[in-house]
Image (cartoon, rainbow, N blue to C red):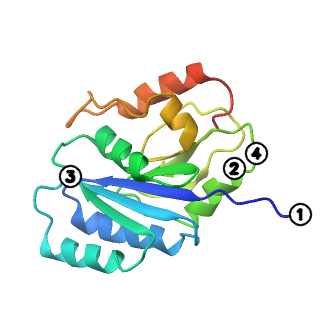
Amino acid sequence: METKKSAVSVIIPTYRRGAQIRVSAAKIQEYLGPEDELILVDQTETPSDETKTFYESLLRDSRVSIYYSAQKSSGQARNTGAFFSRGEVLLFWDDDLEPVGNVVEQHRKWYQKPDVYGVAGCYWGNYLFQPKGNADAWNFAAGHISLRRDVFFQVGGFNTNLVYPFIPEDYELHTRLAKYGGGAR
C-alpha cells in the first residue's frame, strides 16, 4: 500500500531580487508535483521588465500564483503566501537560494512520519544540501524550512511586527514552535 504524498506549497518572498528570483523560482517550479504549488510574494515597488516577463511565463503554469505586497516584511510576505496556500506542507524558501536536488521531495518525505511537524533545511552560502537528519532543529532559518500547514497556523505564523531591515522572524517563530512540542527536525 502506497502512502499518500502530502501536497507542498512552496512560498518565496522576494524584494528587489529579480535576477535571483528568476533562478530560484524556475528551479523550484521544475520540482513541483501535480498537487504542489509555488507562491511568490513580491514586495518590490516596481519589478523590472525582465522580472515581469518572467512572472508572465510562470503564470502559464496553473500551479503558480504571484501576489504583490507594499509592506516590506518577509514575515508578512510568508504569512500571505501561507494564507493563500492549499498544501498540507508549507515550504518557505529564500529568493536567493538555488536548490540542489529535488528539495520539494526531500521535504515531502519527512511528512510521511506523523510525529514530524517541521523540517529545518540546511544551506551553505546560497546552496542547499539537504534537510537535517533526525536531530532536533537548533538553527531554524526561514529561508529553507517547512512546516505542516495546520501547525503553522496553530502557533500564529510569522510575527509581522518584525520588519525590514532587521528581520529575526524565523528565530522568533522557532521559539514558539519549541514550546509546541516534539517533532521538529
**Residue 100 falls left or right of residue 78:** right
Label 2, secondary structure: give it: helix
User: Disc 1 and disc 2: Cα gap in Å?
Assistant: 18 Å
Task: Give the answer, above or below, for where 14 lies relative to 173.
Answer: below
Label 4, secondary structure: give it: loop
Query: Is residue 108 or residue 83 the one in the foreground?
Result: 83
Q: Quadrant of the C terminus?
A: top right
The answer to which of marks 2 and 3 sits earlier in the sequence is 3
Q: Which of the numbered marks, if any, corresponds to residue 43?
A: 3
The answer to which of marks 4 and 1 sits earlier in the sequence is 1
**Which residue is denoted by mark 2 in the rendering?**
110
Marks 2/4 in contact by CB < 8 Å: the verdict is yes
Q: Which of the numbered marks, if any, corresponds to residue 101?
A: none
User: Disc 4 and disc 1: Cα gap in Å?
Assistant: 15 Å
What residue is rendered at 22% in x and 79% in y? 53
What's under tag 3, amino acid-wise? Gln
What's under tag 2, amino acid-wise? Trp
**Which residue is denoted by mark 4 in the rendering?**
113
What's under tag 1, amino acid-wise? Met
User: Disc 3 and disc 1: Cα gap in Å?
Assistant: 44 Å
